[in-house]
Amino acid sequence: MSESISPAFSLEFFPPRDLAGQERLVRAAKQMLAIQPKYVSVTFGAGGSTRAGTADAVRTLRNLGCDAAPHLSCVGASRQDLRDILQAYKGEGVRRVVALRGDLPSGMGGDAGELRYANELVSFIREETGDWFHIEVAAYPEMHPQATNPSADLAHFVSKVKAGADAAITQYFFNADAYFDFVDRARAKGVSVPIVPGIMPITNHTQLLRFSEMCGAEVPRWIRLRLAEFGDDKASIRAFGVDVVTELCQTLLDNGAPGLHFYTLNHSEAPLAIWKELTV
């Protein structure tokens, strides 16, 4: 990382489901403005189940002064659905999106939509809107859980970049070597766009293991054992989590990561505690 280029921090939020959630989102976002995020992203439920909520949260965050990037999933959506969403965001002045394949919600069956993969969605966005949107895509240093092998997973990532992606955000991980290995392999395939590490603060043992099982992120054995030992001691879990994740973040930044993307889960305490410990 060049000394003249400061790392770019960004944040992920999810659409609130009720008034209390809305208030928590606004409170967390206001507190996180301290890190001067380059942008914030807002997730999109399986099969578009939070479409309206995503758009509302984007408006809320933009009103707070954030450059907000809605997640956009092609699963379960027609080309016209996607066209309408893109035009609505464009009309509101949104300039950044996170383009994902997305997941089918339970009960949707085989109705996967007209576009099946994220590279097709990226191509569609470019065809419909040209260079209007800065497009972020997902990357998986430890391999997408549905990929057949690391090489196939990397090939799919390369196809998303070639389709027109501007940058990538990785799934979270706790092994820095996995990230650097993935970046090296992507660079060897001609990928030059920024690949920003996704960072998951550790605040809840059970929740972390559940998320990690779903997304294929490996929680190292030593971390799992330490968390299990803390039991219900939330304060110790949070303190341990800040130490572990701060060290990971510092290692990433010191070795050339272009920034960090914090998965906030609509809470500011842990990401802020980590950020305050970093030397950049």
Image (spheres, rainbow, N blue to C red):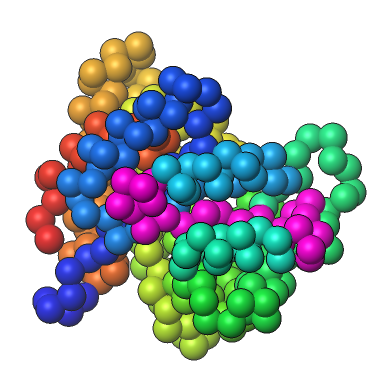
Residue 108 appears in which quarter of the rendering?
top right
Q: Is residue 141 above or below residue 271?
A: below
Total labels: the figure holds 0
Q: Residue 134, percent across and down?
A: 47, 72
Task: Write down the region rendered in magenta.
Answer: 61-82
Residue, x 71% and y 66% (percent of image)? 83
Q: Is residue 189 left or right of residue 148?
A: left
Give me the residue at 73% from left, 46% from top: 47
Q: Quadrant of residue 227?
A: top left
Between 183 and 195, which is closer to the camera in this rendering?
A: 195
Residue 102 seen by the camera: yes
Magenta region includes residue 71 = yes
- 206 shown above or below 2: above
Q: Is residue 193 left or right of 111 when viewed as pictured?
A: left
Residue found farthest to the right: 110
In the rendered view of the protein, which quadrant contains the C terminus? bottom left
Q: Nearer the viewer, residue 174 or 242?
A: 242
Farthest top residue? Answer: 232
Residue 11 image offset from top left, x and y in percent: 36, 50
Residue name at image x 31 percent, y 40 percent: 29
**Is 258 in the magenta?**
no
> Residue, x 42% and y 43% (percent of image)?
60
